[in-house]
Amino acid sequence: MSRRALRRLRGEQRGQEPLGPDALKFVLLDDDDAEEEGPKPGLGGRRPGGAGKEGVRVNNRFELINTEDLEDDLVVNGERSDCTLPDSVSSGNKGRAKHGNAETKQDGGATKAGSSEQENGLEDIDRILERIEDSSGFSHPGPPPLSSRKHVLYVEHRHLNPDTELKRYFGARAVLGEQRPRQRQRVYPKCTWLTTPKSTWPRYSKPGLSMRLLESKKGLSFFAFDHNEEYQQAQHKFLVAVESMEPNNIVVLLQTSPYHVDSLLQLSDACRFQEDQEMARDLIERALYSMECAFHPLFSLTSGTCRLDYRRPENRSFYLTLYKQMSFLEKRGCPRTALEYCKLILSLEPDEDPLCMLLLIDHLALRARNYEYLIRLFQEWEAHRNLSQLPNFAFSVPLAYFLLSQQTDLPEHELSSARQQASLLIQQALTMFPGVLMPLLEYCSVRPDATVSNHRFFGPDAEISQPPALGQLVSLYLGRSHFLWKEPAIMSWLEENVHEVLQAVDAGDPAVEACENRRKVLYQRAPRNIHRHVILSEIKEAVAALPSDVTTQSVMGFDPLPPLDTIYSYVRPERLSPVSHGNTIALFFRSLLPNYTTELCLIVQGERLEEGVAGGPNRNQGLNRLMLAVRDMMANFHFNDLEVPREDNPEGEGDWD
């Protein structure tokens, strides 16, 4: 072992070693003195650092620099390494090496005596290092123990940035080439992890959004976003604008409150429906920046121990913003970054899982080719979450094992074990969910053989007889992940296991009947978070399978299917709406002007905000605008002469059908 390694082990630095009596016994000669005295035997090629060394003849005192480093690199445990030195180093040491060889022969006895003591010391140090390696587990190959591994929901900061993944695909110059000059134009108040602020955004000022710590218990910290009075007023105006069904009203609100999160979410959906994906993504990033600037100092994105209660409306905006950003990242071709966002959403409330991210995390892990993570999640959570009862995990985990067995950089025994586990799990999945096979083959444009298509187990009855809630989960999985099964090698492996399942069914395996009884009991009705996930996914096949009680109620994009036990921190004030009281004149104006109620409410709220300000120049601006619209309407309003019905036909002409 070299001295450098010993110093690192002891925590010492160069120059802090204890000095011996002969440690500073160097002979420093100038060029003139060297010529007068002549060369002295035994000192010409000696270098400091060895036992029994009395001095060094140095023509240039700067040659002492890095002399010890060269020796440390060349000598390891008393043996020289096979590594070659650079030409500049090797050429400078050739002369000294020749003189050193002659001296080594003369002092061979002293060297042997000193080396025996040095070897004993190195043996003791080697034993110490072995004990350290055994205790830390560094010397053992394979994965580290579970205690030293990171939490399964641990989020890495570098993977939250999509540029990290894009650099791996296209290079840093292609990704950051156009971004560097832009970022110098405007200075933003803080550095963020979720998004990078853009120079085209409005100047940031605190919108009244903050975060507070509710409590800390059992190693978990519970937080909640908070709205001040200014933000609450903006929230009330936003709700009025949403009820008007006019996106321009939200645009007007964003002109005064450019970082209002719910307005950014709603306008992003409107832009996405109009196929303006760039603007939609930009609005979501702005909403993320607004919420991250409001984080509590103790709130951590990566620890997996911070919680946000979805029952609070203020927290839901953060969930939905993360979900929409994750969707954009997946469509952009960044599945690894999207997987990190999925883990982040799941870590905010893993027990309740309000957005049901367990229906999506397997898909993102397969797309990101992070098979080990999916397998680890299944192994750690299967005992208490029963992940195998979800069709997506039942089929994705064996697919991950199979794809892992196709890699060539693993040992042969690991490949064989992964292939066996994949076959075992896919047979269990086909037995538990037989209604998945035929729609999957249809998605992949594969025609099964007659043995499979005509068998009662995988026939049409398998898909028809499954409960509606299970059919919804199957439609969601197939609509999202069917393209992952299109490879010929995967289809060949699937075909082999389908025939194995058919043989077990024909042999009367009791597991078949047990799975059938379990399907009837477990999938009677899907919970509300699954319906919420289906609405956010916008997968046509899954949305079409939603029950009627969900499709008949109004669903808002900024808060789809809110929890029934919502915790409100403030209540929306009663709106001054004459329509609710059945005013005939208000109904008349409402029939003629669709935005009459919205305009009137905005006027009333504006007057309430401006109370106490005498002589306000814009006090009656809204009312005057409404009156001008009414006058213009009345000027173009014409009464048509009504035809009197004939006496022979008192009910009038025409048919009602």
Image: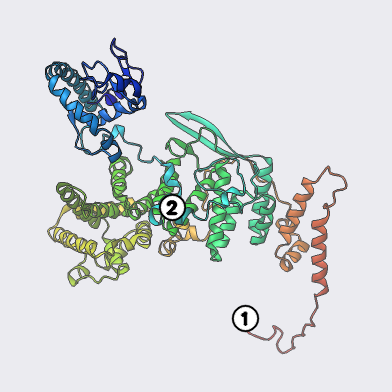
Image quarter of the C terminus: bottom right
Residue at point 39%, 39% (across, down): 154
Task: Name the residue beneath numbered marker 1.
Answer: 656
Q: Secondary structure at mark 2?
A: helix
- The spot of residue 103 in percent (x, y) is 17, 22
Q: Amino acid at mark 2?
A: Ala
- Position of residue 443 in the picture relative to residue 576 (left or right): left
* Front position in the image: 341 or 15: 15
Characterize the local packing of mark 2: few (<14), some (14-19) or many (20 or more) Cα atoms within 10 angstroms. few
- Position of residue 110 in the picture relative to residue 26 (left or right): left
Q: Which mark is residue 571?
A: none
Above or below for 341 versus 118: below
- The spot of residue 180 in percent (x, y) is 53, 51
Task: Name the residue beneath numbered marker 2.
Answer: 172
Query: Spatial distance from mark 1 to mark 2, Cα to Cα?
Result: 69 Å
Residue at the front extreme, as displayed? 36
Q: Amino acid at mark 1?
A: Trp
Image quarter of the N terminus: top left
* Front position in the image: 512 or 83: 83
* Front position in the image: 94 or 292: 94
